[in-house]
Amino acid sequence: MRRHLRPLGAGQCGSFHPKLKSRPSSERSPRSRQTLVPTKLWRGSMTYETPATVLVWDEQPYAGLLNHVLQQEGFHGLIADKLDEVALLAETKCPDIISLSDLPMLHAAMTARHRLYESPRTRHIPVVISLSETADAREFSAHQIGRTEYLFRPFPAQQLIATFHRLRYASSKRISNVLSFADIIINHNARRVYRNTRIVNLGPIEYQLLQHLIARPRQVFSRDELIAAVWGYNIHVVPRAVDVHISRIRKALNEFGEPNYIRTVRGEGYSIDSDIAPSAGAG
């Protein structure tokens, strides 16, 4: 049973954020430019059921409290200390949401936001930026890109969680046709495969095999299972055909020396797994 969350009050988080105070943009006073000092970075376990969230906050005690509250809602996290890690981990882990906290230099947050938007792997990820009550959001809105929302502190935990769930629900409708593993991404709508930012050219059979593997990372599939999933039961395909197509997938994915993520399990079959030798020709 899901626990009902209470607003974060002064007794729960010291003097950080006792309550929500949202003000119209016309009443928000401008402030000097500040820069982002991230201390916390969270992400969820990368399954289809558990939402993954990247959070960067400038106050460690409050970040720890939010981590606990978010865990009650099914979110999980990873700690990081640098703003640069936001884009890097977002590109490799593909979280559902990214949230940035208070800013000691507004341009630092917008630089990170632009980098996220420029990458095809992270362009679709909504970003929530938490500002102090004296911040002026007009500097942000003047450069609005992608799906970006702002919350003015202090606010109760429910507001942040509700925002996350709303954005994740809206995003799920838009990106349900996207699969990814590490730096490999499959866009079903476009029928395209990307590695980092380049397009990987695959034939129809290779495309379906890769799709089947990425949809179930680290699961080992026998050749017969892959034949049934891709070719179906009404056509005779020799197991050796799977090996040939897997070889073509590896060649296309690893054309420029990228790590090989398709693992051969001798006597069993194939899986996609990052915990294997980095050689492009690894079997």
Image: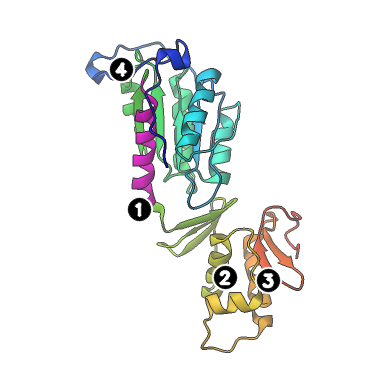
Task: Kindly state the secondary structure of the residue where label 4 is placed.
Answer: loop
Mark 2 → mark 1, Cα distance in angstroms: 24 Å
Asked if residue 161 is positioned above or below residue 247 in the image, the reply reads above
Asked if residue 197 is positioned above or below residue 78 in the image, the reply reads below
Location of residue 178 by image quarter: bottom left
Q: What span is in magenta?
A: 155-172
If you read the primary sequence from the N terminus, does the residue marked by circle 2 or circle 4 appear first?
A: 4
Q: Quadrant of the N terminus?
A: top left
Residue corresponding to mark 2: 209
Point out the residue furthest to the front here.
1
Q: Of 224 and 196, which appears nearest the observer?
A: 224
- Tag 3 near tag 1, CB within 8 Å: no
Q: Of 151 and 5, which appears nearest the observer?
A: 5
Task: Name the residue type under label 1.
Answer: Lys
If you read the primary sequence from the N terminus, does the residue marked by circle 3 or circle 4 appear first?
A: 4
Residue corresponding to mark 1: 173
Mark 1 → mark 4, Cα distance in angstroms: 31 Å
Task: Kindly state the secondary structure of the residue where label 1 is placed.
Answer: helix
Residue corresponding to mark 3: 247
If you read the primary sequence from the N terminus, does the residue marked by circle 3 or circle 1 appear first?
A: 1
Mark 3 → mark 2, Cα distance in angstroms: 11 Å
Mark 3 → mark 4, Cα distance in angstroms: 58 Å
